[in-house]
Image (cartoon, rainbow, N blue to C red):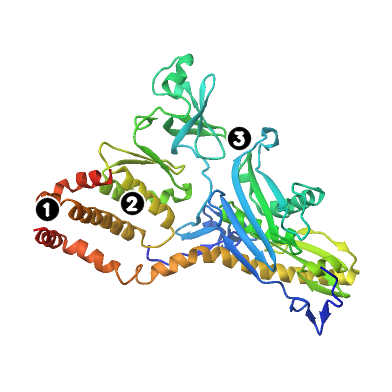
Amino acid sequence: MTKPESFITNGIRIDGRKPEEIRPITIEVGVLDRADGSCYIEHGLNKVLAAVYGPREVHPRHMQKPTTAIVRFRYNMASFSVEERKRPGPDRRSVEVSKVSREALEPVIFTEYFPKSSIDVFVEVLQADAGTRTVGINAASVALADAGIPMRGLVSACAVGKVDGELVLDLMKEEDNYGEADMPLAMTQTGEITLLQMDGNLTPEEFEKAIEMAQEGCKRIYEIQRNALIERYKRDIETEEEPLETPEEEPVEVETVVENEAEEETSEEVESE
Amino acid sequence: MSEKQRIVIPGDLVSRDPARRGDGTYVRDGSLYASLYGLVNEREKIRVVPLSGKYVPTRRDVVVGFVKEVTFSNWIVDIGSPYEGLLHVSEYPRRIELDEMSAHLGIGEAVLVEVKEVDPMMKVELTMRDRRLRVIRSGRIVEISPSKVPRLIGHGGSMISLIKGASDCSIVVGQNGRVWINGKGCDEGLAAEAIDKIESESHIPGLTDRLGRFFEETKNDADLNESDSEEEVVVESGEEAGKGNNIIDELLE
Protein backbone atom coordinates (compact mmCIF):
# COMPACT_ATOMS: atom_id res chain seq x y z
CA MET A 1 0.00 0.00 0.00
CA THR A 2 1.36 3.39 -0.96
CA LYS A 3 0.32 6.86 -0.05
CA PRO A 4 -2.18 8.25 -2.54
CA GLU A 5 -1.29 11.62 -4.09
CA SER A 6 -4.45 13.23 -2.86
CA PHE A 7 -7.20 11.95 -0.62
CA ILE A 8 -9.98 14.15 -1.86
CA THR A 9 -10.60 15.19 -5.45
CA ASN A 10 -13.65 17.33 -6.24
CA GLY A 11 -15.09 16.54 -2.82
CA ILE A 12 -14.92 12.79 -3.41
CA ARG A 13 -12.66 10.48 -1.39
CA ILE A 14 -10.50 7.72 -2.85
CA ASP A 15 -13.18 5.08 -2.38
CA GLY A 16 -15.86 7.30 -3.88
CA ARG A 17 -17.45 8.53 -0.66
CA LYS A 18 -18.32 12.07 0.34
CA PRO A 19 -16.45 13.41 3.40
CA GLU A 20 -19.38 12.83 5.77
CA GLU A 21 -20.41 9.46 4.39
CA ILE A 22 -19.92 6.14 6.23
CA ARG A 23 -18.92 2.89 4.53
CA PRO A 24 -21.59 0.32 3.69
CA ILE A 25 -22.45 -1.91 6.66
CA THR A 26 -24.08 -5.31 6.76
CA ILE A 27 -24.95 -6.94 10.07
CA GLU A 28 -25.94 -10.52 10.69
CA VAL A 29 -27.31 -11.48 14.11
CA GLY A 30 -27.09 -14.86 15.82
CA VAL A 31 -24.44 -16.47 13.64
CA LEU A 32 -22.90 -18.67 16.34
CA ASP A 33 -24.93 -21.47 17.92
CA ARG A 34 -22.64 -22.07 20.87
CA ALA A 35 -22.60 -18.46 22.02
CA ASP A 36 -25.48 -16.90 23.96
CA GLY A 37 -25.42 -13.98 21.57
CA SER A 38 -23.42 -13.26 18.44
CA CYS A 39 -23.08 -10.89 15.55
CA TYR A 40 -21.09 -10.64 12.35
CA ILE A 41 -20.44 -7.25 10.82
CA GLU A 42 -18.96 -6.19 7.53
CA HIS A 43 -18.16 -2.53 7.66
CA GLY A 44 -16.51 -1.52 4.44
CA LEU A 45 -13.64 -3.97 4.20
CA ASN A 46 -13.66 -4.72 7.92
CA LYS A 47 -14.94 -8.14 8.86
CA VAL A 48 -15.61 -8.61 12.55
CA LEU A 49 -17.22 -11.39 14.55
CA ALA A 50 -18.52 -10.82 18.08
CA ALA A 51 -19.67 -13.42 20.60
CA VAL A 52 -21.24 -12.89 24.01
CA TYR A 53 -21.39 -15.47 26.78
CA GLY A 54 -23.22 -15.05 30.00
CA PRO A 55 -24.17 -14.00 32.49
CA ARG A 56 -22.22 -16.98 33.75
CA GLU A 57 -20.10 -18.06 36.69
CA VAL A 58 -16.90 -16.10 37.16
CA HIS A 59 -13.60 -17.90 36.77
CA PRO A 60 -11.24 -17.17 38.43
CA ARG A 61 -13.49 -16.75 41.47
CA HIS A 62 -11.67 -13.82 43.04
CA MET A 63 -12.71 -11.58 40.15
CA GLN A 64 -16.39 -11.76 40.99
CA LYS A 65 -18.14 -8.78 42.50
CA PRO A 66 -20.74 -9.40 45.20
CA THR A 67 -23.30 -6.91 43.94
CA THR A 68 -22.85 -6.67 40.18
CA ALA A 69 -21.83 -8.65 37.16
CA ILE A 70 -18.39 -8.01 35.73
CA VAL A 71 -17.97 -7.34 32.04
CA ARG A 72 -14.95 -8.78 30.28
CA PHE A 73 -14.08 -7.78 26.77
CA ARG A 74 -11.46 -9.42 24.59
CA TYR A 75 -10.52 -7.75 21.35
CA ASN A 76 -8.33 -9.86 19.14
CA MET A 77 -6.98 -9.50 15.64
CA ALA A 78 -6.52 -12.64 13.59
CA SER A 79 -2.98 -13.08 12.34
CA PHE A 80 -4.32 -12.94 8.77
CA SER A 81 -6.42 -9.83 9.31
CA VAL A 82 -3.78 -7.42 8.05
CA GLU A 83 -1.40 -7.37 5.08
CA GLU A 84 1.72 -8.18 7.05
CA ARG A 85 1.12 -11.21 9.27
CA LYS A 86 0.27 -10.06 12.77
CA ARG A 87 1.96 -11.98 15.53
CA PRO A 88 -0.94 -13.76 17.23
CA GLY A 89 -1.92 -13.18 20.82
CA PRO A 90 -2.57 -10.18 22.99
CA ASP A 91 -0.27 -7.22 22.62
CA ARG A 92 -0.14 -3.70 23.98
CA ARG A 93 -2.60 -2.40 21.42
CA SER A 94 -5.22 -5.11 21.77
CA VAL A 95 -5.14 -4.90 25.56
CA GLU A 96 -5.81 -1.19 25.31
CA VAL A 97 -8.58 -1.61 22.76
CA SER A 98 -10.18 -4.28 24.95
CA LYS A 99 -10.15 -1.97 27.94
CA VAL A 100 -11.62 1.07 26.24
CA SER A 101 -14.23 -1.03 24.43
CA ARG A 102 -15.32 -2.62 27.68
CA GLU A 103 -15.66 0.80 29.23
CA ALA A 104 -17.65 1.95 26.22
CA LEU A 105 -20.22 -0.81 26.71
CA GLU A 106 -20.37 -1.16 30.50
CA PRO A 107 -22.50 1.96 31.17
CA VAL A 108 -25.47 0.60 29.21
CA ILE A 109 -25.53 -2.87 30.75
CA PHE A 110 -27.69 -3.48 33.83
CA THR A 111 -24.90 -5.32 35.61
CA GLU A 112 -26.71 -5.06 38.95
CA TYR A 113 -29.26 -7.65 37.76
CA PHE A 114 -26.66 -10.40 37.84
CA PRO A 115 -24.50 -10.18 40.97
CA LYS A 116 -21.47 -12.48 41.19
CA SER A 117 -21.55 -13.33 37.51
CA SER A 118 -19.62 -12.32 34.42
CA ILE A 119 -20.61 -11.24 30.95
CA ASP A 120 -17.87 -12.14 28.50
CA VAL A 121 -17.57 -10.44 25.15
CA PHE A 122 -15.21 -11.68 22.48
CA VAL A 123 -14.46 -9.67 19.39
CA GLU A 124 -12.43 -11.24 16.62
CA VAL A 125 -11.21 -9.10 13.77
CA LEU A 126 -11.01 -11.30 10.69
CA GLN A 127 -10.13 -8.58 8.23
CA ALA A 128 -9.01 -5.11 9.21
CA ASP A 129 -9.41 -1.93 7.26
CA ALA A 130 -9.21 0.91 9.83
CA GLY A 131 -11.65 1.60 12.61
CA THR A 132 -11.76 -1.96 13.92
CA ARG A 133 -12.35 -0.88 17.51
CA THR A 134 -15.48 1.02 16.52
CA VAL A 135 -16.69 -1.92 14.43
CA GLY A 136 -15.94 -4.22 17.35
CA ILE A 137 -18.05 -2.10 19.69
CA ASN A 138 -20.93 -2.01 17.20
CA ALA A 139 -20.79 -5.79 16.83
CA ALA A 140 -20.50 -6.40 20.57
CA SER A 141 -23.46 -4.16 21.32
CA VAL A 142 -25.69 -6.08 18.90
CA ALA A 143 -24.42 -9.42 20.23
CA LEU A 144 -25.21 -8.33 23.81
CA ALA A 145 -28.79 -7.54 22.81
CA ASP A 146 -28.99 -10.90 21.04
CA ALA A 147 -27.82 -12.65 24.21
CA GLY A 148 -30.84 -11.25 26.03
CA ILE A 149 -28.76 -9.13 28.38
CA PRO A 150 -30.72 -6.20 29.82
CA MET A 151 -29.37 -2.89 28.59
CA ARG A 152 -30.35 0.77 28.64
CA GLY A 153 -29.83 0.93 24.90
CA LEU A 154 -27.36 0.09 22.18
CA VAL A 155 -23.92 1.62 21.81
CA SER A 156 -22.78 2.80 18.41
CA ALA A 157 -19.29 3.84 17.48
CA CYS A 158 -17.73 5.68 14.58
CA ALA A 159 -14.44 7.40 13.80
CA VAL A 160 -13.64 10.80 12.34
CA GLY A 161 -10.29 11.80 10.92
CA LYS A 162 -8.48 14.47 9.03
CA VAL A 163 -6.96 14.01 5.59
CA ASP A 164 -5.68 16.74 3.31
CA GLY A 165 -6.66 19.21 6.00
CA GLU A 166 -10.30 18.23 5.79
CA LEU A 167 -12.43 16.29 8.27
CA VAL A 168 -13.77 12.98 6.99
CA LEU A 169 -16.09 10.47 8.62
CA ASP A 170 -15.26 6.77 9.02
CA LEU A 171 -11.68 6.50 7.84
CA MET A 172 -10.57 3.68 5.56
CA LYS A 173 -7.12 2.09 5.56
CA GLU A 174 -5.21 4.61 3.43
CA GLU A 175 -6.81 7.57 5.18
CA ASP A 176 -5.96 6.08 8.55
CA ASN A 177 -2.34 5.26 7.68
CA TYR A 178 -1.41 8.49 5.96
CA GLY A 179 -3.97 10.91 7.38
CA GLU A 180 -3.34 13.64 9.91
CA ALA A 181 -5.74 12.57 12.67
CA ASP A 182 -8.00 9.71 13.74
CA MET A 183 -10.64 10.07 16.43
CA PRO A 184 -12.89 7.11 17.33
CA LEU A 185 -16.02 7.89 19.31
CA ALA A 186 -18.69 5.68 20.85
CA MET A 187 -22.00 6.86 22.18
CA THR A 188 -25.21 5.52 23.64
CA GLN A 189 -28.42 6.18 21.80
CA THR A 190 -29.21 9.00 24.22
CA GLY A 191 -26.05 10.76 23.10
CA GLU A 192 -23.73 10.08 26.02
CA ILE A 193 -20.19 9.61 24.81
CA THR A 194 -18.65 6.46 26.26
CA LEU A 195 -15.44 6.35 24.25
CA LEU A 196 -13.35 9.14 22.85
CA GLN A 197 -9.78 8.72 21.73
CA MET A 198 -7.61 10.64 19.35
CA ASP A 199 -4.30 10.38 17.68
CA GLY A 200 -2.92 13.13 15.48
CA ASN A 201 -3.78 16.79 15.79
CA LEU A 202 -6.99 18.76 15.49
CA THR A 203 -7.63 22.43 16.26
CA PRO A 204 -10.31 23.12 18.89
CA GLU A 205 -12.71 24.16 16.11
CA GLU A 206 -12.00 21.01 14.13
CA PHE A 207 -12.46 18.95 17.28
CA GLU A 208 -15.94 20.37 17.88
CA LYS A 209 -16.88 19.73 14.28
CA ALA A 210 -15.40 16.23 14.40
CA ILE A 211 -17.50 15.26 17.42
CA GLU A 212 -20.63 16.43 15.65
CA MET A 213 -19.74 14.43 12.55
CA ALA A 214 -19.00 11.31 14.57
CA GLN A 215 -22.31 11.64 16.41
CA GLU A 216 -24.12 11.85 13.08
CA GLY A 217 -22.28 8.73 11.94
CA CYS A 218 -23.18 6.89 15.15
CA LYS A 219 -26.86 7.72 14.64
CA ARG A 220 -26.75 6.23 11.17
CA ILE A 221 -24.98 3.13 12.44
CA TYR A 222 -27.53 2.82 15.24
CA GLU A 223 -30.32 2.62 12.67
CA ILE A 224 -28.47 -0.19 10.88
CA GLN A 225 -27.91 -2.08 14.14
CA ARG A 226 -31.54 -1.66 15.11
CA ASN A 227 -32.74 -2.85 11.71
CA ALA A 228 -30.55 -5.94 11.84
CA LEU A 229 -32.02 -6.96 15.18
CA ILE A 230 -35.62 -6.27 14.18
CA GLU A 231 -35.35 -7.94 10.77
CA ARG A 232 -34.03 -11.15 12.26
CA TYR A 233 -37.43 -12.06 13.69
CA LYS A 234 -39.72 -9.81 11.69
CA ARG A 235 -39.31 -11.91 8.58
CA ASP A 236 -40.61 -14.98 10.40
CA ILE A 237 -43.52 -13.18 11.96
CA GLU A 238 -44.69 -11.52 8.77
CA THR A 239 -44.45 -14.39 6.34
CA GLU A 240 -46.39 -16.53 8.75
CA GLU A 241 -49.12 -13.97 9.26
CA GLU A 242 -50.20 -14.10 5.60
CA PRO A 243 -51.84 -17.29 4.28
CA LEU A 244 -50.39 -19.83 6.66
CA GLU A 245 -47.19 -21.40 5.33
CA THR A 246 -46.76 -22.78 1.82
CA PRO A 247 -50.15 -22.31 0.24
CA GLU A 248 -49.80 -25.02 -2.42
CA GLU A 249 -49.53 -28.34 -0.68
CA GLU A 250 -50.15 -28.21 2.98
CA PRO A 251 -53.70 -26.94 3.44
CA VAL A 252 -54.97 -29.70 1.14
CA GLU A 253 -53.10 -32.29 3.12
CA VAL A 254 -54.50 -31.01 6.39
CA GLU A 255 -58.04 -31.08 5.12
CA THR A 256 -57.82 -34.66 4.02
CA VAL A 257 -56.37 -35.60 7.34
CA VAL A 258 -59.15 -33.97 9.28
CA GLU A 259 -62.16 -34.81 7.17
CA ASN A 260 -61.40 -37.87 5.12
CA GLU A 261 -59.48 -39.93 7.55
CA ALA A 262 -61.88 -42.81 7.31
CA GLU A 263 -62.10 -42.59 3.54
CA GLU A 264 -58.37 -42.54 3.12
CA GLU A 265 -57.94 -45.68 5.06
CA THR A 266 -60.61 -47.51 3.11
CA SER A 267 -59.10 -46.41 -0.17
CA GLU A 268 -55.74 -47.73 0.96
CA GLU A 269 -57.36 -50.98 1.79
CA VAL A 270 -58.80 -51.18 -1.68
CA GLU A 271 -55.40 -50.52 -3.17
CA SER A 272 -53.73 -53.18 -1.12
CA GLU A 273 -56.30 -55.66 -2.11
CA MET B 1 -52.09 -14.80 18.94
CA SER B 2 -53.86 -12.78 16.28
CA GLU B 3 -52.61 -9.39 17.48
CA LYS B 4 -49.55 -8.11 15.69
CA GLN B 5 -46.47 -8.50 17.82
CA ARG B 6 -44.06 -5.65 18.14
CA ILE B 7 -40.36 -6.41 18.33
CA VAL B 8 -38.30 -4.02 20.42
CA ILE B 9 -34.62 -3.68 21.14
CA PRO B 10 -33.05 -2.28 24.31
CA GLY B 11 -33.66 1.45 24.54
CA ASP B 12 -36.89 1.52 22.54
CA LEU B 13 -39.70 3.63 23.95
CA VAL B 14 -42.60 1.38 24.96
CA SER B 15 -44.86 3.76 26.86
CA ARG B 16 -45.14 7.28 28.25
CA ASP B 17 -46.72 5.93 31.42
CA PRO B 18 -44.07 4.69 33.87
CA ALA B 19 -46.76 3.31 36.18
CA ARG B 20 -47.31 0.42 33.77
CA ARG B 21 -43.75 -0.80 34.18
CA GLY B 22 -43.42 -4.56 33.86
CA ASP B 23 -40.52 -6.98 33.40
CA GLY B 24 -37.94 -6.15 30.77
CA THR B 25 -38.46 -2.39 30.94
CA TYR B 26 -36.94 0.55 32.77
CA VAL B 27 -37.87 4.17 33.45
CA ARG B 28 -35.85 7.07 32.14
CA ASP B 29 -37.03 10.70 32.21
CA GLY B 30 -40.57 9.70 33.15
CA SER B 31 -41.03 7.32 30.22
CA LEU B 32 -40.86 3.57 29.88
CA TYR B 33 -38.16 1.98 27.74
CA ALA B 34 -37.36 -1.61 26.83
CA SER B 35 -34.28 -3.08 28.47
CA LEU B 36 -34.44 -6.35 26.54
CA TYR B 37 -34.55 -7.55 22.97
CA GLY B 38 -37.96 -9.16 22.62
CA LEU B 39 -41.67 -8.84 21.99
CA VAL B 40 -43.92 -6.31 23.71
CA ASN B 41 -46.77 -7.69 25.77
CA GLU B 42 -49.32 -5.00 26.66
CA ARG B 43 -51.76 -5.81 29.41
CA GLU B 44 -52.21 -3.79 32.57
CA LYS B 45 -48.46 -3.81 32.81
CA ILE B 46 -46.24 -3.54 29.79
CA ARG B 47 -43.68 -6.30 29.63
CA VAL B 48 -40.97 -7.12 27.17
CA VAL B 49 -40.85 -10.87 26.68
CA PRO B 50 -37.25 -11.72 25.84
CA LEU B 51 -36.30 -13.89 22.86
CA SER B 52 -33.22 -15.22 24.65
CA GLY B 53 -31.46 -15.03 27.97
CA LYS B 54 -30.30 -17.01 30.97
CA TYR B 55 -32.41 -18.44 33.75
CA VAL B 56 -32.29 -16.50 36.99
CA PRO B 57 -33.72 -18.52 39.89
CA THR B 58 -36.61 -17.17 41.93
CA ARG B 59 -38.34 -18.62 44.95
CA ARG B 60 -40.77 -21.50 44.38
CA ASP B 61 -39.57 -22.27 40.84
CA VAL B 62 -39.53 -25.95 39.99
CA VAL B 63 -36.36 -26.77 38.08
CA VAL B 64 -34.49 -29.76 36.71
CA GLY B 65 -30.89 -29.87 37.87
CA PHE B 66 -27.83 -32.07 37.60
CA VAL B 67 -25.70 -32.88 40.62
CA LYS B 68 -22.30 -31.31 40.15
CA GLU B 69 -20.62 -32.02 43.43
CA VAL B 70 -21.29 -33.65 46.77
CA THR B 71 -19.92 -31.74 49.75
CA PHE B 72 -20.05 -32.35 53.48
CA SER B 73 -23.78 -31.74 53.86
CA ASN B 74 -24.90 -30.33 50.52
CA TRP B 75 -25.33 -31.42 46.97
CA ILE B 76 -24.24 -28.72 44.58
CA VAL B 77 -26.67 -28.72 41.70
CA ASP B 78 -26.25 -27.19 38.27
CA ILE B 79 -29.60 -25.54 37.57
CA GLY B 80 -28.69 -24.11 34.16
CA SER B 81 -28.16 -20.60 35.47
CA PRO B 82 -25.17 -18.42 36.37
CA TYR B 83 -25.75 -19.50 39.96
CA GLU B 84 -25.44 -22.99 41.34
CA GLY B 85 -28.08 -24.48 43.60
CA LEU B 86 -27.46 -25.95 47.04
CA LEU B 87 -29.48 -28.95 48.15
CA HIS B 88 -28.97 -29.65 51.82
CA VAL B 89 -29.23 -33.24 53.13
CA SER B 90 -32.14 -32.21 55.32
CA GLU B 91 -34.04 -31.22 52.18
CA TYR B 92 -33.83 -34.74 50.76
CA PRO B 93 -37.21 -36.51 51.08
CA ARG B 94 -35.82 -39.06 53.52
CA ARG B 95 -33.39 -38.91 56.40
CA ILE B 96 -29.90 -39.69 55.13
CA GLU B 97 -26.61 -40.17 56.95
CA LEU B 98 -23.94 -37.71 55.82
CA ASP B 99 -21.59 -40.44 54.65
CA GLU B 100 -24.28 -42.05 52.52
CA MET B 101 -25.14 -38.98 50.47
CA SER B 102 -23.43 -40.17 47.29
CA ALA B 103 -25.20 -43.51 47.45
CA HIS B 104 -28.61 -41.86 47.32
CA LEU B 105 -27.80 -39.09 44.90
CA GLY B 106 -24.52 -39.14 43.05
CA ILE B 107 -22.66 -36.82 40.74
CA GLY B 108 -24.26 -36.52 37.32
CA GLU B 109 -27.72 -37.60 38.44
CA ALA B 110 -30.71 -35.49 37.53
CA VAL B 111 -33.12 -34.13 40.11
CA LEU B 112 -36.44 -32.39 40.04
CA VAL B 113 -36.18 -29.75 42.75
CA GLU B 114 -37.85 -26.58 43.95
CA VAL B 115 -36.08 -23.33 44.70
CA LYS B 116 -36.62 -22.82 48.40
CA GLU B 117 -34.89 -19.51 48.86
CA VAL B 118 -32.71 -17.06 46.93
CA ASP B 119 -30.86 -14.44 48.93
CA PRO B 120 -29.54 -11.13 47.57
CA MET B 121 -26.09 -12.68 47.25
CA MET B 122 -27.69 -15.18 44.88
CA LYS B 123 -27.18 -18.13 47.18
CA VAL B 124 -29.79 -20.54 45.87
CA GLU B 125 -31.24 -23.06 48.30
CA LEU B 126 -33.13 -26.00 46.86
CA THR B 127 -35.55 -28.47 48.35
CA MET B 128 -36.97 -31.88 47.46
CA ARG B 129 -39.49 -31.94 50.27
CA ASP B 130 -42.60 -32.16 48.15
CA ARG B 131 -44.40 -35.11 46.67
CA ARG B 132 -43.87 -34.11 43.05
CA LEU B 133 -40.10 -33.62 43.53
CA ARG B 134 -37.76 -36.54 43.05
CA VAL B 135 -34.54 -37.94 41.68
CA ILE B 136 -34.97 -38.48 37.95
CA ARG B 137 -33.99 -42.00 36.97
CA SER B 138 -36.14 -42.67 33.90
CA GLY B 139 -37.31 -40.93 30.78
CA ARG B 140 -35.29 -38.25 29.09
CA ILE B 141 -34.44 -34.59 29.60
CA VAL B 142 -34.47 -32.06 26.78
CA GLU B 143 -33.27 -28.51 27.08
CA ILE B 144 -34.85 -25.36 25.66
CA SER B 145 -34.11 -21.70 26.16
CA PRO B 146 -35.57 -20.57 29.52
CA SER B 147 -37.21 -17.63 27.75
CA LYS B 148 -39.39 -20.10 25.83
CA VAL B 149 -40.77 -21.85 28.91
CA PRO B 150 -43.99 -19.79 29.11
CA ARG B 151 -44.73 -20.59 25.47
CA LEU B 152 -44.13 -24.29 25.98
CA ILE B 153 -46.60 -24.34 28.86
CA GLY B 154 -49.14 -22.13 27.08
CA HIS B 155 -52.12 -20.31 28.54
CA GLY B 156 -53.25 -22.33 31.52
CA GLY B 157 -51.12 -25.25 30.38
CA SER B 158 -52.86 -25.55 26.99
CA MET B 159 -49.73 -26.14 24.92
CA ILE B 160 -48.17 -28.70 27.19
CA SER B 161 -51.37 -30.68 27.53
CA LEU B 162 -51.58 -30.80 23.74
CA ILE B 163 -48.17 -32.47 23.64
CA LYS B 164 -49.01 -34.73 26.56
CA GLY B 165 -52.18 -35.82 24.81
CA ALA B 166 -50.48 -36.53 21.51
CA SER B 167 -47.44 -38.32 22.88
CA ASP B 168 -49.00 -39.99 25.91
CA CYS B 169 -46.02 -38.93 28.05
CA SER B 170 -45.89 -37.26 31.40
CA ILE B 171 -43.96 -34.02 30.92
CA VAL B 172 -42.50 -31.76 33.60
CA VAL B 173 -41.27 -28.36 32.48
CA GLY B 174 -38.61 -26.85 34.71
CA GLN B 175 -38.55 -23.07 34.88
CA ASN B 176 -34.89 -23.28 33.86
CA GLY B 177 -35.81 -24.66 30.45
CA ARG B 178 -35.05 -28.30 31.17
CA VAL B 179 -37.95 -30.56 30.36
CA TRP B 180 -38.39 -34.04 31.73
CA ILE B 181 -40.30 -36.41 29.46
CA ASN B 182 -41.31 -39.66 31.06
CA GLY B 183 -43.83 -42.46 30.76
CA LYS B 184 -44.11 -46.15 30.10
CA GLY B 185 -44.29 -47.00 26.42
CA CYS B 186 -44.96 -43.41 25.47
CA ASP B 187 -43.62 -41.63 22.44
CA GLU B 188 -40.73 -39.69 23.96
CA GLY B 189 -39.29 -38.95 20.54
CA LEU B 190 -42.46 -37.31 19.35
CA ALA B 191 -42.71 -35.19 22.49
CA ALA B 192 -39.08 -34.11 22.19
CA GLU B 193 -39.57 -33.20 18.56
CA ALA B 194 -42.65 -31.14 19.37
CA ILE B 195 -40.80 -29.31 22.14
CA ASP B 196 -37.97 -28.62 19.72
CA LYS B 197 -40.45 -27.20 17.25
CA ILE B 198 -41.89 -24.89 19.89
CA GLU B 199 -38.45 -23.62 20.80
CA SER B 200 -37.49 -22.74 17.25
CA GLU B 201 -40.85 -21.26 16.25
CA SER B 202 -42.27 -19.79 19.43
CA HIS B 203 -42.07 -16.20 18.18
CA ILE B 204 -44.12 -16.96 15.07
CA PRO B 205 -47.88 -16.48 15.46
CA GLY B 206 -50.22 -19.44 15.06
CA LEU B 207 -48.00 -21.85 16.94
CA THR B 208 -50.78 -23.95 18.44
CA ASP B 209 -52.37 -24.52 15.03
CA ARG B 210 -49.08 -25.51 13.49
CA LEU B 211 -48.34 -27.90 16.31
CA GLY B 212 -51.74 -29.50 15.91
CA ARG B 213 -51.00 -29.98 12.25
CA PHE B 214 -47.56 -31.34 13.07
CA PHE B 215 -49.13 -34.07 15.20
CA GLU B 216 -51.66 -34.87 12.50
CA GLU B 217 -48.88 -35.13 9.94
CA THR B 218 -46.64 -37.39 11.98
CA LYS B 219 -49.63 -39.57 12.71
CA ASN B 220 -50.46 -39.63 9.04
CA ASP B 221 -46.86 -40.34 8.01
CA ALA B 222 -46.80 -43.26 10.34
CA ASP B 223 -50.03 -44.54 8.83
CA LEU B 224 -48.62 -44.18 5.34
CA ASN B 225 -45.45 -46.00 6.27
CA GLU B 226 -47.56 -48.81 7.53
CA SER B 227 -49.35 -49.16 4.23
CA ASP B 228 -46.05 -49.15 2.35
CA SER B 229 -44.30 -51.76 4.39
CA GLU B 230 -46.85 -54.12 5.81
CA GLU B 231 -50.20 -54.45 4.18
CA GLU B 232 -51.67 -56.57 6.91
CA VAL B 233 -51.03 -53.95 9.52
CA VAL B 234 -53.09 -51.45 7.55
CA VAL B 235 -56.10 -53.66 7.64
CA GLU B 236 -55.64 -54.19 11.32
CA SER B 237 -55.35 -50.53 12.12
CA GLY B 238 -58.39 -49.85 10.02
CA GLU B 239 -60.36 -52.16 12.20
CA GLU B 240 -58.98 -51.13 15.53
CA ALA B 241 -58.17 -47.44 15.47
CA GLY B 242 -57.19 -47.53 19.11
CA LYS B 243 -54.07 -49.53 18.37
CA GLY B 244 -52.63 -46.74 16.22
CA ASN B 245 -50.34 -45.42 18.92
CA ASN B 246 -48.57 -48.67 19.59
CA ILE B 247 -47.92 -49.16 15.92
CA ILE B 248 -46.30 -45.76 15.63
CA ASP B 249 -44.06 -46.72 18.52
CA GLU B 250 -43.01 -49.89 16.76
CA LEU B 251 -42.25 -48.09 13.55
CA LEU B 252 -40.10 -45.49 15.24
CA GLU B 253 -38.08 -48.14 16.91
The residue under label 3 is which amino acid type? Met
Nearer the N terminus, badge 2 or badge 1? 2
Rendered view: A131 above or below B138: below
The x, y position of residue A102, in whole percent, is 72, 51
Q: Which chain letter matches label 2?
A: B
Q: Nearer the viewer, residue B16 or A177?
A: A177
State the quadrant of the C terminus of chain B: top left
Graded by Cα atoms within 10 Å as few (under 14), some (14 to 19) or many (20 or more), the crowding at tag 1 reads some
Q: Chain of mark 1?
A: B
Left or right: residue B169 versus residue A80 is left
* Residue placed under numbered mark 3 in the picture: B121
- Three-letter amino acid code at disc 2? Met
Instruction: Provide the residue designation for mark 1.
Output: B238
Q: Tell me the CA gap for discs 3 and 2.
A: 35 Å
How far is the residue under mark 1 from the one under mark 3?
62 Å
Q: Residues within 10 Å of mark 2 (few under 14, many from 20)?
A: many
Q: Is residue B139 above or below residue A49?
A: above
Q: Nearer the viewer, residue A82 or B8?
A: A82
Q: Quadrant of the N terminus of chain B?
A: bottom left
Q: Which disc, if any, is residue B159? A: 2
Of the two numbered discs 1 and 3 in the rendering, the one whose residue sits closer to the viewer: 1
Judge whether residue B16 can be spotted in this image. Answer: no
Label 1 secondary element: helix
Residues at marks 3 and 2 on the same chain: yes
Kind of residue sitting beneath label 1? Gly
- The spot of residue B199 in percent (x, y) is 42, 52
